[in-house]
Image (cartoon, rainbow, N blue to C red):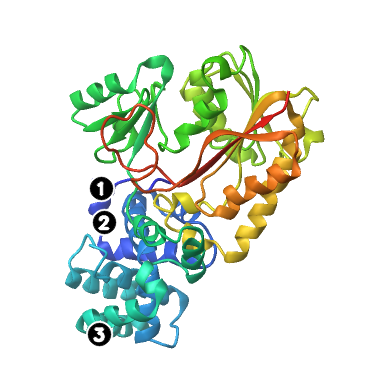
Amino acid sequence: MNSTAATSSHAHSLPLSRLLAHTADAVAAVRSGRSLTEALAACPAPARPGTQSLSFHVMRWMGGAEAARERLAPRMPPPRVDALLITALALLWPDAAAPYPDHTLVDQAVACAHQIAPKSASFVNAILRRFLRERDALVADLKATLPVARHQHPRWWIDQLQRDWPRQWTELLAEANQAAPMMLRVHAGHGDAARYVAELAAAGLGAVAVGAHAVVLDQPVPVQLLPGFAEGRVSVQDLSAQRAAPLLLGTGPDALPAGARVLDACAAPGGKTAHLLELRPDLELLALDSDAVRLQRVAETLARLHLLGARTAAADARDTAAWWDGRPFDAILLDAPCSASGIVRRHPDVRWLRRASDIGDLARTQRALLDTLWPLVRPGGRLVYATCSVFRAEGAGQISAFLQRHADASAGQAPGHLLPLTDNPPQAGATVPVPAGDGFFYARLDKQP
């Protein structure tokens, strides 16, 4: 799922009441603990683009919508009706710049209620019309008294960012509610960013080149409209994620040797695996992932890009007896499971799915992976640790503790925490301001010879 996906024209031909019903179902799924990706997969194909567009919108403003519903209707209505109310209130939230006029949203939400819960239609109508009458004063009061309504994130998430980033936390929360730009990686074997930007311009698509192979589109488009996508000449990948492969491979005297043996320990969906092989086709690369279904996506990605130099295996990286042949690796990329707090622009449901206790659980998993994989690095080799998180417990805190446990490890040059803000260190070769990449953390760990 990509937050940059646009609502297709055929979705606009569907009645808004129908899209609201599907969106309410997706919202109910997220509130019950299922991912929005999973919920949208269950949506009928003709309605999916429009439902995705509305669902992303609702996820970004659901904190205020839930607070408003609780104020206007303290007794929770039936789950599906409640999800419809939350959907409509989020779309009516004054900061949200909804794609439909207020009266249209109310009319179609009531029509939707008639379809899914006829006895609740008058209740839905009353709540939404009262919200519009009292909106300015009600929203101002909710923002003043409830951080979840002011910042559109759970309270624990807000508190964690405030502790981790006391100067930037409000910017991070505001940026998380913006749609992420669509960013591309040009296959190193098929040209460079500057030439691809010219090709995009010829196709009527505006973009800017960032360094040798990265491109940022002015506006998101379906991948089918990207020149050469089907042929494997370009991939969708965030700028921050594009830092992984060069960091692991090194340059000049620091570059990995010819035919280096490399492990991509948590490889799915395969973007970083592919980037490694695009830059160094000579690698002996093992792409490992514990999820066999997701691992299939790695194989599909490599096939589209015509990259044949990787072996894939489905196994838990911590269970080395199940997959390791005993030969050490020159380099390991550990893109570890994490909170995904750095990619909430692209996956706005993440904030509502995570719990505060998840961070400690994930940090323990990350520690176990680091400690298990480190002995597999040859003396003089390296391990790059990455997470798409902005929480320090999954980044700087994790690596600081690792270095205290392992006397044979030292910290090499790496970006550290990358925040989805414009004051990050620029991508190498950038000559013009570009949108910030996702929130990431990178550390390079070098093993003593």
Q: Nearer the viewer, mark 3 or mark 2?
A: 3
The quadrant in which residue 58 appears is bottom left
Residue sitting at x 22%, y 73%: 107
Alpha carbon of mark 2 to alpha carbon of mark 1: how far? Answer: 7 Å
Q: Tag 2's secondary structure? A: loop
Q: Is residue 18 left or right of residue 70?
A: left
Crowding around mark 2 (Cα neighbors within 10 Å: few <14, some 14 to 19, many 20+) is few
- The answer to whether one can see residue 118 in this image is no
Determine contact: label 2, label 1, CB under 8 Å. Answer: yes
Q: Position of residue 385 (x, y in %)?
A: 60, 38
Q: Which residue is disc 2 drawn over?
A: 14
Indicate whether 149 appears above or below 286. below
Indicate whether 191 appears above or below 6. above
Q: Which residue is disc 3 drawn over?
A: 130
Query: Disc 2 residue type?
Result: Leu
Between 438 and 265, the one lying in front of the other is 438
Query: Disc 3 residue type?
Result: Arg
Determine contact: label 3, label 2, CB under 8 Å. Answer: no
**Label number found at residue 10:** 1
Q: Position of residue 133 (x, y in %)?
A: 20, 83
